[in-house]
Amino acid sequence: MGMHSITVTVNGEKEYLEVPSHMTLLQMLREKLAITGPKNGCSAGECGACTVLLDGEPVNSCMVLAVEVDGHEVVTVEGLAKEGQLTPLQQAFIEHNAVQCGFCTPGMLISAEALLKRNPHPTEEEIKEALVGNLCRCTGYIRIIRAVQTAAEKGGA
């Protein structure tokens, strides 16, 4: 298992890293860059807790090798707020109490962010479809869906 030099832009910052062949994007973010928003919930691409944006598209970072992101752009939940200002989506999650234990929240926000960038005025069904890969064991989804609807009403992500 050799080491590979990669260059990747993470949350707007260009990073030059040495990563082993077997390291996942999730491991790279957490272990090499100390970015802890994406969570390791299942290591099988089933729960969505590790969801990040890869070139603007949501992916399960536990299923992507770090070497595959060489030359690409990654955005984590830490990269959503700009200059310390919460996005309308993040604010809506707070307003609707769409966060309980918080484990799923980073992945939910990333998936909803991607949806609202692609479709600023989604229907409830489109919101549900966009979040289908993200599991929550606390809120029952209603508050999360309402938060995404509110963010859409206030101008999107």
Image (cartoon, rainbow, N blue to C red):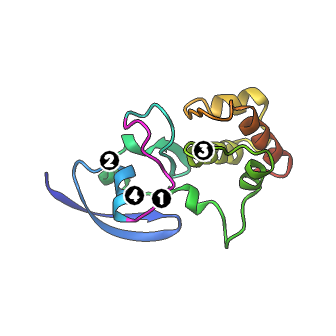
> Residue 127: x and y, percent?
71, 33
Q: Which mark is residue 101?
A: 3
118 relative to 91, above or below? above
Do callouts 1 and 2 mark residues in contact (Cβ within 8 Å)? no
The residue that label 4 is drawn on is 30
Q: Earlier in the sequence, mark 2 or mark 4?
A: 4
Please state which amino acid type lies under the numbered disc 2: Leu
Number of residues whose C-alpha sits closer than 10 Å to that of mark 3, classed few (under 14), some (14–19) or many (20 or more): few
Please state which amino acid type lies under the numbered disc 4: Arg
Q: Which mark is residue 73?
A: 1
Query: Mark 1 to mark 2: distance in Å?
Result: 14 Å
Residue displayed at 66% across by 68% down: 82
Query: Mark 3 to mark 2: distance in Å?
Result: 28 Å
Residue stretch rendered in magenta on the structure: 33-43
- Of badges 2 and 4, nearer the viewer stands 4
Q: Earlier in the sequence, mark 1 or mark 4?
A: 4
Please, what secondary structure does the residue beneath circle 3 have?
A: loop
- Of badges 3 and 4, nearer the viewer stands 3
Residue displayed at 33% across by 53% down: 66
Q: Which mark is residue 65?
A: 2
Residue 8 part of the magenta-drawn span: no
Q: Earlier in the sequence, mark 1 or mark 3?
A: 1
Who is closer to the viewer here, 127 or 106?
Answer: 106
> Residue 19: x and y, percent?
25, 59
Do callouts 3 and 4 mark residues in contact (Cβ within 8 Å)? no
Please, what secondary structure does the residue beneath circle 1 have?
A: strand
103 relative to 130, above or below? below
